[in-house]
Image (cartoon, rainbow, N blue to C red):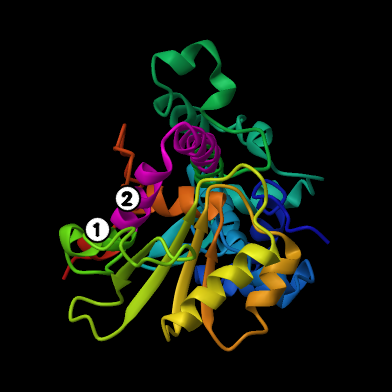
Amino acid sequence: MPIPDYQTLMLPLLRFAGDNAEHTPREAVEALASQFKLTPVERAELLASGQQALFNNRVGWANSYLKKAGLLEASRRGVFRITDRGRHVLSDNPERIDTKFLEQFPEFIEFRDASKNTREEAKPEAATPASSQTPEESLEIAHQSIRLDLAQEILSRILSCSPAFFERLVVELLVKMGYGGSRRDAGARIGQSGDGGIDGIIKEDRLGLDTIYLQAKRWQGSVGRPEIQKFVGALQGQRARKGVFITSSSFTAEAIDYTSRIDTKVVLIDGQLLANLMMDFDVGVSVSASYLVKRIDSDYFEEE
């Protein structure tokens, strides 16, 4: 079954706490994962940022909202328990608890209203999401959408540039990733190998213990196996063991399969991966805005 959203988890979480005992968030995650029969793969699924398990995040937000409504409370650091109000809600045997249900409690209304900003006052549903996404999920999905749009713009700009510019871009990216020492050292050998199958040579590390041969293709069509075979032949002519083939487009399945079957190590970087690496290492992009998502520091509020 699909991973339940955080609102679907509210009632099961409250029932889990209905034994009146203190519980840790980890205990709640384990119990609810078992109740919903989640597979190890589903348990391991991460948020878009890769920083937290999706299911753990959803249980955490269900816990947070129930606390805001006064149905759960933090009895001490790292544990929670049900409140008298929570027990009363369970005694009414509700079919579902969600953000709409929680609006009957003044503490939750106060929390919801406090999280509105001036722009959101015209659309109050934005402050307390009625969707299946937690606030962090919504933020990460929006971030991924921005990245996808930016990636398309990056590739569009690359296609409008000259092949020589693309070769320099590739070298600058690899230097930013930690290869080649300085950009001047790496870029000095671009186009000087004398081999039509090699566009440049870059040091694998700052000490130059090994070299990596580059091929950069600013193409719109897919790069097929014949192009990769030509590059591998050029590598063998240089007695090279490693190569990176970078394109602004994509690789055919035959080209990808071919590189997996040869002894020479050839890494293929297509347009989508290239754009992502450029964003990650700040090549051709700049920061427009930065948002920090912060959590409570429980240790700070622990009195001696």
Specify whether residue 293 is painted magenta.
no
Q: Dominant secondary structure of the magenta stretch?
A: helix
Q: Residue 116: where, in percent of width, then height?
A: 43, 23
Q: Name the residue under label 1.
A: 187
Image quadrant for the C terminus? bottom left
Query: Is 137 above or below relative to 170?
Result: above
Q: Residue 275: where, in percent of width, then height?
A: 47, 47
Specify whether residue 167 is painted magenta.
yes
Residue 168 tag number: 2
Near-viewer residue (202 or 298): 202
Asked if residue 22 can be seen in this view, the reply is no
Q: Quadrant for residue 59, please give it.
A: bottom right
Is 229 positioned to the left or the right of 158 in the image? right
Residue type pointed to by label 1: Gly
Is 64 positioned to the left or the right of 279 in the image? right
Specify the farthest residue to the top.
Answer: 122
Residue type pointed to by label 2: Arg
- Per the image, label 2 sits on a secondary structure element best described as helix
Q: Are marks 1 and 2 in contact (CB under 8 Å)?
A: yes
Near-viewer residue (61 or 285): 285
Image quadrant for the N terminus? bottom right
Q: In terms of sequence position, does the residue under pointer 1 or pointer 2 come before the other?
A: 2
Q: How crowded is mark 1: few (under 14 residues within 10 Å), some or many (20 or more)?
A: many
Q: What stretch is highlighted in magenta?
A: 144-173
- Per the image, label 1 sits on a secondary structure element best described as helix
